[in-house]
């Protein structure tokens, strides 16, 4: 699973959203992406979007993976997030295999190879 923490007001997040759908198709049907918007989290003093705006944003880009919203800040606390975007590649046992602070290219051959290796593990 690729877990991405993002916000609609974050320019690198917005740019990367377009490429996550390709990553979803990259690794096959066992691979999942969950993108969690932290819009509304009081920790961030930015312009915030609500659920309607977040889903409209996802619809405009044609995103096909799970779009979630955590205005409470619980995910930020649970994962000790420094900022957005942050991404976590998590194996089938729930172990974080890779953490990326900032924008990441999940279509990069190194990342693709890591995802395929994890998919081949039983």
Image (spheres, grey):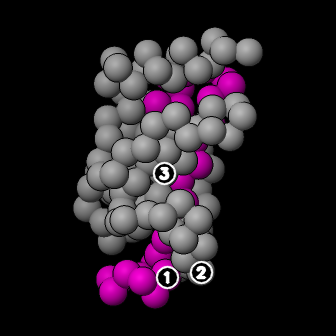
Q: Is residue 84 above or below residue 107?
A: below
| Residue beneath the point at 37% across and 65% down | 82
Q: Is residue 37 left or right of residue 118?
A: left
2 or 1: mark nearer the eye: 2
Labels 2 and 3 touching (C-beta < 8 A): no
Labels 2 and 1 touching (C-beta < 8 A): yes
Secondary structure beneath label 3: strand
Q: Is residue 117 left or right of residue 12?
A: right
Q: Earlier in the sequence, mark 2 or mark 1?
A: 1
Of helix, strand and loop, which mostly describes the magenta segment? loop
Q: Earlier in the sequence, mark 1 or mark 3?
A: 3
Q: Please provide the residue range marked out in magenta.
A: 23-49
Q: Residue at the far left: name it.
A: 11
> Label 1: which residue?
40
Identify the mark at residue 4; answer none if there is no mark: 3
Q: Is residue 15 above or below residue 43?
A: above
> Label 2: which residue?
72
How many angstroms separate mark 2 from mark 1 (CA)?
Answer: 7 Å
Front-most of residues 13 and 53: 13
In this orientation, does residue 58 appear? no
Mark 3 packing: few (<14 Cα in 10 Å), some, or many (20+)? many
Identify the mark at residue 61; answer none if there is no mark: none
Q: Is residue 61 left or right of residue 65?
A: left
Is residue 44 found inside the magenta-colored segment of the image? yes
Residue 21, position as x, y percentages in the image = 48, 37
Hey, which quadrant is residue 94 in on the image?
top right
Hey, which quadrant is residue 81 in on the image?
bottom left
């Amino acid at each position: 699973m690729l877990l991405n923490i993002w916000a609609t007001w974050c320019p690198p997040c917005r740019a990367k959203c377009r490429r996550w759908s390709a990553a979803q198709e990259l690794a096959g049907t066992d691979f999942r992406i969950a993108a969690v918007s932290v819009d509304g989290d009081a920790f961030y003093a930015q312009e915030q979007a609500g659920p309607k705006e977040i889903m409209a944003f996802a619809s405009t880009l044609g995103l096909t993976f799970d779009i979630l919203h955590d205005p409470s800040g619980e995910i930020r606390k649970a994962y000790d997030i420094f900022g957005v975007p942050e991404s976590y590649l998590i194996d089938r046992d729930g172990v974080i295999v890779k953490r990326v602070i900032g924008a990441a290219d999940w279509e990069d051959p190194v990342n693709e190879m890591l995802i395929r290796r994890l998919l081949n593990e039983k």
